[in-house]
Amino acid sequence: MKAKDNSEKSNLHPRNLHRSRYDFENLISNCPELKQYLSINKFGVETIDFANPGAVKVLNKALLKTYYNINFWNIPPNYLCPPIPGRIDYIHYIADLLATSNNGIIPSDPTVLGLDIGTGANLIYPILGNAVYNWSFVGTDIDQKAIENCSKIIQANPQLVDSISLQQQTEPRFIFKNIITPEDRFAFTMCNPPFHASAEEANKSASRKVSNLNQKEKRNTNPVLNFGGQNAELWCKGGEIGFITQMIYESAKYTSQVLWFTTLVSKKENLSAIYKTLKKVNAFTIKTIEMSQGQKNSRIVAWSFLDDKQEQKWFV
């Protein structure tokens, strides 16, 4: 007999629609293929196997259709499949950040332009930001196949066509160069940088993650990361701190064209070096926003080169 779990994920943002347990009945009504992945756990609660990449992918399809009006969404095999509750939290915290520059009011219209660095094949941040706040986006990636898949998602969802544009970064050592043009004016940039410094480190992390998900089941000796990920999505030379350091130094070249630069920081031990680099480039304001989802703790670091008067004039 199945039981209902009404517990709330209080660590998620207050506006997050996924603070409660998934309503599988509603999700299946919008995405029938999810039903095949449903099972009853030892507590008698309906769930899916989160170690199964196929199940996680179909859950995402159901969530996007049910809550965000996305009728088609797909990713190629082995590309990063993002957990939507955590991704929408980043969007909500950016909305709160923008409100601090707009007399406490969240700006919710297409003139608010965001830049998503490393949008991947999933396009998840532009999709969510547009659906919830009506923002416009430029999504960038170094991976041509990822860009091509994002284009398919946009074309299959008419409401995205005029709101999201894509640009391939043709020089992987750069982040903003080649992307931000002299006429551009972004309310924010966002990024979920590669965590790891090598493929070996990424594979070890994948093994630990799958082992934790299946700790009471037979251990998989050749684990498949349930959220997938190509090399460029998971690791880069220098790892997270190397990527973010490069981003900060480049951001100093676009001081008047971006209101808020932001990035996720997975590793807390990287914060000290990040703050030092931000001081070196003379960032005027630096903010750290704590985030958590389940067992995972993360944070957003945001910085601006605009003084208080310039900041408050941004949305005027």
Image: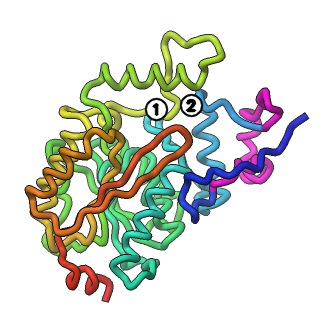
User: What residue is pinned by disc 2?
Assistant: 53
User: What residue is pinned by disc 1?
Assistant: 228
Whether residues under marks 1 and 2 lie with C-beta atoms below 8 angstroms apart, the answer is yes
Picture disc at residue 312: none
> Which residue is at a point 26% across and 86% down the rendered structure image?
313
Residue 124 on image: x %, y %: 46, 53
- Taking depth in this image into account, of 11 and 155 the one nearest to the observer is 11
Residue 166 horizontal side relative to residue 295, left or right: left
Range of the magenta residues? 18-45
> Which residue is at a point 49% across and 43% down the rendered structure image?
82
Residue 153 horizontal side relative to residue 63, left or right: left
Residue 150 on image: x %, y %: 42, 51
Q: Residues within 10 Å of mark 1 (few under 14, many from 20)?
A: some
Helix, strand, or loop for circle 2?
helix
The magenta stretch spans residue 25: yes
Residue 218 on image: x %, y %: 63, 11
